[in-house]
Image (cartoon, rainbow, N blue to C red):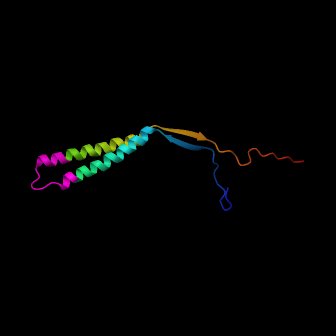
Amino acid sequence: MGLFSRKESWERTFRLRSHHGISRGFLAVLFWLWGGVGLLFNAGTLFGLTGNIGVGTSAYLTATCLVWIGGMVLFGIGALLAHTDFDGERPIEEDYGDLRISR
């Protein structure tokens, strides 16, 4: 309790702590690697085009972009939905354990 803190208008009864598993971190790393490498690959392919661009080249660029976007969605949603454990705890009251003797 701070000196200048306001009194809470609600009662705090429960606190949640989340514990992330290793799968969430692994999928997040894959998300960032896939995104960075895929963006560089697609940008390099796009800026490396010279001359006439036909239907085959356009279809190739579209396919690679769709695979890249699909991987981003897969790894991103996988990281968000990865198993997370929640622990709940109740805070101890301030005067818990006080011994008050009165006459």
Residue 11 falls left or right of residue 45? right
What x and y, as percent, mark residue 58?
Answer: 15, 49
Q: Residue furthest right?
A: 103
Question: Is residue 45 found inside the magenta-colored segment of the image?
Answer: yes
Front residue (pair 15, 71) = 71
- The answer to which quarter of the image holds residue 7 is bottom right
Residue 26 falls left or right of residue 65? right
Tell me which residue sits at (58%, 40%) in the image. 88
Front residue (pair 83, 27) = 27
What x and y, as percent, mark residue 51?
Answer: 10, 56
What x and y, as percent, mark residue 86?
Answer: 53, 39
Tell me which residue sits at (27%, 48%) in the image. 38
- The answer to which quarter of the image holds residue 22 is top left
Front residue (pair 13, 50) = 50
Q: Quadrant for the N terminus, please.
A: bottom right
Tell me which residue sits at (39%, 44%) in the image. 28
What x and y, as percent, mark residue 27?
Answer: 38, 41
The residues colored magenta run 44-61
